Amino acid sequence: MKNHTHLDLLQKELGYHFKDPVLLLRCLTHVSYERKKSEGHNEVLEFLGDAVLDLAVSDLLIQRNPDKSEGVLSKMRAALVNSAVLAEKAAMLNFGPLLRIGKGEEWSGGRSKSSILAGAFEAILGGVYQDGGYEAARAVVQRFFVDDVSAKKLGQHDYKTRLQEISQMLFHAPPLYRIVAETGPDHEKRFVTEIAVGGKVLAIGEGKSKKQSEQEAAKRALGELQKNGEQTAAD
């Protein structure tokens, strides 16, 4: 019952409800999971979702940057579509508890591995494409990437981008964002985001939108990492 509720919440956040619930489960099933052959896993859906994501993000970038060259657009897409970013999106959607993974992956922390999270996010996009077609999949991509596409300017790094670079360098894993609170009426919403880096909750941020609260959390996390680095140097 609990898992069913989580799946409903996931679909609500995606903005898409699967007509085939078995397909949704397959999207969340890692190849390591012990299952009947008829149930399948998400590797092929991941492959399909990767192609859908590239096409949909390319479409969004061209719409908002019609005068950019192919080379520039390719760099922008690469910055937007990579395993670290996709793992972050999956973590925001709280994929972890819903993943069906094998015992080995369970013991080794597979629910928080960026490769498994990123793969599941791509598989979800592949599943949406199979279940509802390209326009449905594109709508999901737009829902989760339109702010990134609009804010992305080459040579200018926002707090989230900078933190992601540092987290990958220090911990070989992306920072994980989680909305922990929403307050206020619909027209004056306030969001609170918690951010974990290297498996440790480092900061929280608040803002009028999820994006704003994430940026504030990333800014504070950068400050904490800098402070910790200075303390280590002093020691």
Image (tube, rainbow, N blue to C red):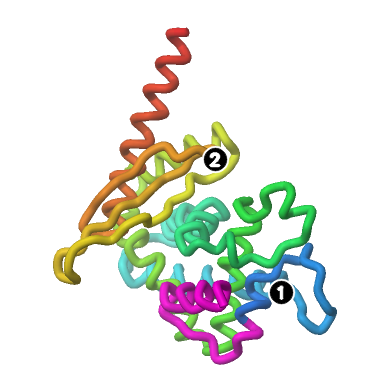
Residue 170 picture location, percent across and down? 55, 32
Residue 20 picture location, percent across and down? 60, 90
Q: Is the residue 127 above or below the residue 81 in the image?
A: below
Residue sitting farthest toward the front:
1
- Report, in whole angstroms, how far the alpha carbon at label 1 lies from the one at label 2: 30 Å
Residue sitting farthest toward the top:
235
Q: For the residue marked with disc 1, what is the amino acid?
A: Val
Q: Main secondary structure of the magenta part?
A: helix
Q: Is the residue 201 above or below the residue 68 in the image?
A: above
Q: Is residue 100 magenta?
A: no
Corner quadrant of residue 26: bottom right
Residue at (37, 34) in percent of width and height: 222
Q: For the residue marked with disc 2, what is the amino acid?
A: Gly
Q: Give the magenta part as a residue range.
A: 1-23
Q: Is residue 28 left or right of residue 101?
A: left
Q: Which residue is mark 1?
A: 44
Q: Residues within 10 Å of mark 2 (few under 14, many from 20)?
A: few
Observer-side mark, 1 or 2, equals: 2
Residue at (63, 51) in percent of width and height: 113
Compare residues 125 and 38 and report the one nearer the observer: 38
Q: Which residue is mark 2?
A: 199
